[in-house]
Amino acid sequence: MTTTTISPARHRSLGDQTWQDQAVCQSTEYNPVDPDVFFPEPDETDKIATAKSLCGQCPVRDVCLDAALEGGDTHGIRGGMTEEEREPLHEKLASRLDYSRVNATIAGRDIHLTKAERRAVVRAAYRHGLTEQRLAWLLKITEEHAQKLYRETRRALRNRKMQQTTYPTLPPGPDYDRLGRDNFGTVA
Ligand code: SF4
């Protein structure tokens, strides 16, 4: 008998709140939680310790942290981190370039992308011959917009090729070159 194992999606789909059902901080009749402990003042160390201890047992801790960062939620303890601890992560988010997110998007997942990740999706889609219609669907944009992105990509690649021909000792190109055909369609 053949069995199939479906790996859980690594990244949260946009708008998906179902992960909250597993949150340890969800107060129930059998698991009463004081929500106030998740909004401590910086010197309320007991509250912080209590909240962090709950987060430490939470099965959706990573998703919770991602959701807070992507949603710009800077208040309270999220994913086991205080507001102050999350601050540098919020600042760094805009420059994130996570290829597992690029691959997941190419495979059809609707997930949060930074500008750099959207650009990488366009380059990867272009290089792998995806149609403009498919790109439009993947990025939830119009076909005209997808055509424009492909035009810009074509031009950028052509310019880069010309530069490499003229200056063969230039350093290697951007990271999107690391994406191989085998990277696609295996996520989600
Ligand atoms: S990680 Fe902490 S704040 Fe996030 S859902 Fe779990 S218990 Fe709640």
Image (spheres, helix red, strand yellow):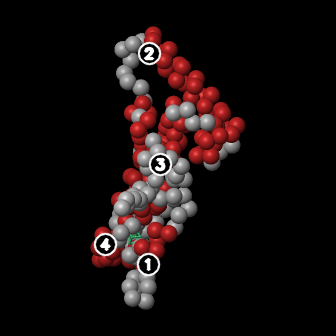
Mark closer to the chain start, 2 or 1: 1
In this figure, which residue is indicated by the disc labeled 3?
104
Please give the residue where the numbered disc 4 appears in the rendered image. 57
The residue carrying mark 1 has its beta carbon less than 8 Å from ligand 1:
yes
Question: Would you place residue 6 above or below residue 101 in this image?
Answer: below
Amino acid at pointer 1: Gln
Q: Is residue 31 above or below residue 47?
A: below
In the rendered image, the quadrant that contains the N terminus is bottom left
| Of the image marks 4 and 1, the number of the one nearer the N terminus | 1
Mark 3 packing: few (<14 Cα in 10 Å), some, or many (20+)?
A: many
**Which quarter is ligand 1 in?**
bottom left
Q: Is residue 48 left or right of residue 72?
A: left
Which residue was labeled with disc 2? 164
Q: Nearer the viewer, mark 3 or mark 2?
A: 3
Percent position of residue 158, x then y: 54, 20
Disc 4 Cβ-to-ligand 1 distance below 8 Å:
yes
